[in-house]
Image (cartoon, rainbow, N blue to C red):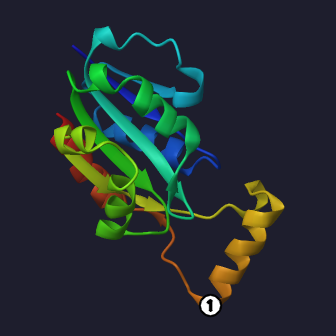
Amino acid sequence: MKTLILFGSKTGTTELCANKIKEQLANCEIDVADIKKSKNLALGQYETVVIGTPLYMGQVTGPVKKYLNLHENELLSKKLHFFVCGLALGQEGVDLFQKQISSQLFSHASQVKQLGGDIHLEKLNPLYKWMMKKIMTKEKPKLGLLDEEIKLFAQDIK
């Protein structure tokens, strides 16, 4: 059966991460889709579903939350994996994600990993841009996707 990698992305980091996961699964039949454009996507053809979301100010994006709520029952019948991208690294990012989705979906997932994050100031609205500049002057967040973690994440999907 096929694997679906769904992602929500505001600035492109989570989309890039989704495609890096796909590259690691080169010998598998994989579809990658933007969650905003996948409202009518039939999940029945997929055995495994991987869902990625960015965290902005510790929050899962609205389109991802909405998708998870609308498709929860069907997702509970799939092999499910989650990844998050954002500046809250490691377990902190996973914990923020866990607080915002149903406990059934979270516990059903085979894995939930934080796979790095980045800042694209040019793609942010003025308020977020101002906030990120403030944060970056006080803290020096670790930026970039975590390629080794992505590789390990993909190995657990196979």
Tell me which corner region of the image, top left, top right, bottom left or bottom right, holds residue 110.
top left
Q: Determine crowd level at label 1: few under 14, some 14-19, many 20+ residues with C-alpha closer than 10 A.
A: few
Tell me which corner region of the image, top left, top right, bottom left or bottom right, holds residue 62.
top right
Residue 38 lies, in percent from the top left, at: 53, 20
Q: Which residue is mark 1?
A: 138
Residue at image location 29% in from the left, 54% down from the top:
113
Front residue of 60 and 132: 60
Q: Is residue 18 above or below residue 127?
A: above
Q: Is residue 9 above or below residue 33?
A: below
**Numbered-mark total:** 1
In this picture, residue 48 sits left or right of residue 37: left
Kind of residue sitting beneath label 1: Lys
Q: Is residue 149 above or below residue 28?
A: below
Residue 86 lies, in percent from the top left, at: 49, 61
Residue at image location 18% in from the left, 38% down from the top:
108
Secondary structure type for disc 1: helix
Quadrant location, the N terminus: top left
Quadrant location, the C terminus: top left
Residue 11 lies, in percent from the top left, at: 65, 50
Give the residue at the far bottom of this rendering: 138
Residue 85 lies, in percent from the top left, at: 45, 56
